[in-house]
Image (spheres, rainbow, N blue to C red):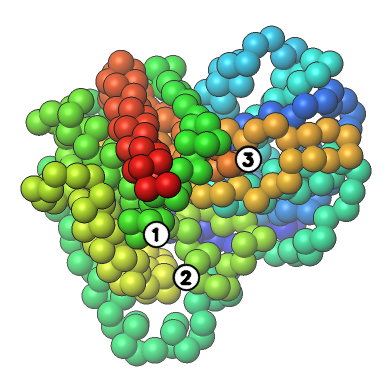
């Protein structure tokens, strides 16, 4: 255990941060990959990373007393620099190999830092692969770190203020919400119900199949929609009053039903950025988790896709309106004693959904810099040690819709995953082609 006189204590981990960390032995990482045009010098990249680390505490910190009931983040007196691996750029898909390595990387969470960068570079192209433990950062935070890194790499200074301490729960939840007797009673009741449910679940959850999934069998599938198709897809979604997230979610539900058949759960979990609801967490602040929506297909007897999508959108809108971020956080902060049961359920319990699906939307990064250009941003990836490792993340950069699909061969055979992605892509192309024909017939 570190000597508190030598280490700067930050704050205890929040419950959901502890869920992501577990006992610190299993990787639960996020990965971003970008492609730059222009040769990036090792010294320049190392200097930019040093500036980035100096600015963000999350890139400096480690975790103390990780197996205790109250582990906490701390800043070491001597901070290790962000590890940087440089390799020669050999082919266009090499980044996928590095991304998988980043997803499997076991960070030393007790010493830190929980961040790593790989650079694949030749005289014309440089791919940067940023890996981080999910407990320090989510997808939105990953975009922020890329923007800051590229700013420093271009020899400029950031216009975002440095944060001198981590956000605490009291910073996020307004005092009137925390002190409300109604909220205190409500969240205590909710947490009590959850503890009871987890206790019952733990009794019936076996750990006999703990060796089923090995991280060496993780895989990554990548797909990208061209600019014209992306533009039409976004346009027809807007025309029908359906978000891109909902439309793709419905296609995924249909894909799983077709490919997995009776094994399909008809349920997709969709993370929601908590920053949109808890304004105390600003867009230029790192945070590690959000809330979750659930998509299911009611299988209404419609002849076309869009009426079904509109019905699903109505359900999604109701779920979003019902989200209560402060109650969500207060409830989970009362579950710390139930953490072992929660992790047991998530790791060994019966899988209740098909996958996690997230659309992080348009990535607001500029293309042109003084010393290089940003050619593309590949959709981020995330995978952890839980029973269902399947995650699809999509994003849009340079007006191109991009997909990353990660899972594990022991859970979902890669050939089935390919069929799922192909189904979604083919259905999107059919809907796009139909929209183009209708447009041509009316002009």
Q: Which label sits in the foreground, 1 or 3?
A: 3
**Residue 258 location, x and y as percent?**
18, 29
Using a 10 Å C-alpha cutoff, classify the residue at mark 3 as few (fewer than 14 neighbours), some (14 to 19) or many (20 or more). Answer: some
Q: Residues within 10 Å of mark 1 (few under 14, many from 20)?
A: some
In this picture, residue 271 sits left or right of residue 265: right
Kindly state the secondary structure of the residue where label 1 is placed. strand
Q: Nearer the viewer, residue 431 or 358?
A: 431
Which residue: 31% across, 72% down?
A: 322
Residue 398 marker: 3
Q: Image height check: is 344 above or below 14?
A: above
- At 37% from the left edge and 48% from the top edge, which residue is drawn? 442
Is residue 140 among what the camera can see?
yes
Residue 289 rendering spot, x and y as whole percentages: 47, 54
* Horizontal arrangement in the rendering, residue 148 relative to residue 295 (left or right): right
Q: Position of residue 355 (x, y in %)?
A: 31, 39
Asked whether the beta carbons under mark 3 and mark 2 sit within 8 Å of each other, the answer is: no
Compare residues 200 and 47 and report the one nearer the observer.
Answer: 47
Residue 204 quadrant: top left
Residue that carries the numbered disc 2 in the rendered image: 277
Label 2 – label 1 distance at C-alpha: 10 Å
**Residue depicted at x 60% and y 47%:** 363
**Can residue 334 be seen in this snapshot?**
no
Query: What crowding class fits label 2: few (fewer than 14 Cα within 10 Å), some (14-19), or many (20 or more)?
Result: some
Left or right: residue 54 compared with residue 282: right
Q: Secondary structure at mark 2?
A: loop
The residue to which callout 1 is attached is 291
The mark that comes first in sequence, 3 or 2, is 2
Disc 3 to disc 2, C-alpha distance: 27 Å
Q: Are marks 2 and 1 in contact (CB under 8 Å)?
A: yes
Give the mark nearer the N terminus: 2 vs 1.
Answer: 2
For marks 1 and 3, the one nearer the N-term is: 1
Q: Position of residue 288 (x, y in %)?
A: 53, 53
């Amino acid at each position: 255990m570190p000597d508190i006189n030598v280490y700067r204590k930050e704050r205890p981990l929040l419950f959901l941060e502890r869920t992501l960390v577990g006992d610190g032995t299993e990787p639960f990482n996020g990965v971003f990959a970008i492609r730059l045009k222009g040769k990036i010098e090792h010294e320049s990249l190392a200097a930019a990373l040093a500036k980035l680390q100096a600015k963000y505490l999350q890139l400096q910190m480690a975790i103390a007393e990780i197996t205790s009931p109250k582990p906490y983040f701390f800043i070491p007196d001597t901070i290790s620099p962000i590890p940087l691996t440089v390799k020669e750029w050999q082919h266009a898909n090499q980044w996928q190999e590095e991304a998988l390595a980043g997803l499997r990387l076991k960070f030393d969470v007790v010493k830190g830092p929980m961040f790593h960068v790989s650079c694949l570079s030749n005289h014309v192209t440089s791919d940067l692969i940023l890996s981080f433990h999910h407990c320090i950062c989510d997808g939105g935070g990953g975009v922020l770190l890329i923007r800051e890194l590229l700013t420093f790499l271009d020899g400029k200074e950031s216009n975002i203020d440095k944060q001198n301490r981590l956000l605490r729960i009291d910073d996020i939840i307004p005092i009137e919400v925390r002190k409300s007797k109604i909220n205190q009673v409500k969240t205590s009741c909710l947490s009590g119900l959850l503890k009871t449910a987890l206790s019952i679940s733990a009794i019936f959850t076996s750990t006999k199949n703990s060796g089923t999934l090995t991280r060496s069998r993780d895989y990554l599938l990548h797909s990208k929609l061209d600019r014209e198709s992306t533009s039409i897809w976004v346009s027809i979604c807007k025309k029908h009053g359906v978000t891109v997230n909902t439309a793709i979610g419905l296609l995924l539900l249909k894909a799983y039903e077709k490919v997995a058949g009776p094994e399909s759960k008809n349920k997709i979990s969709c993370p929601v950025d908590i920053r949109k609801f808890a304004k105390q967490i600003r867009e230029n602040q790192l945070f590690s988790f959000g809330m979750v929506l659930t998509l299911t297909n009611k299988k209404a007897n419609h002849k076309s896709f869009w009426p079904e999508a509109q019905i699903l959108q109505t359900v999604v809108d109701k779920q979003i309106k019902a989200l209560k971020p402060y109650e969500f956080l207060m409830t989970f902060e009362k579950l710390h004693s139930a953490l072992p049961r929660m992790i047991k359920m998530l790791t060994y319990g019966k899988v209740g959904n098909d996958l996690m699906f997230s659309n992080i939307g348009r990535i607001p990064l500029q293309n042109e810099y003084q010393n290089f250009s940003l050619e593309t941003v590949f959709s981020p990836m995330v995978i952890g040690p839980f029973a269902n490792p399947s995650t699809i993340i999509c994003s849009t950069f340079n007006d191109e819709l991009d997909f990353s699909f990660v899972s594990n061969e022991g859970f979902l055979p890669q050939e089935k995953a390919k069929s799922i992605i192909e189904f979604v892509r083919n259905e999107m192309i059919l809907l796009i082609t139909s929209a183009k024909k209708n447009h041509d017939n009316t002009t």
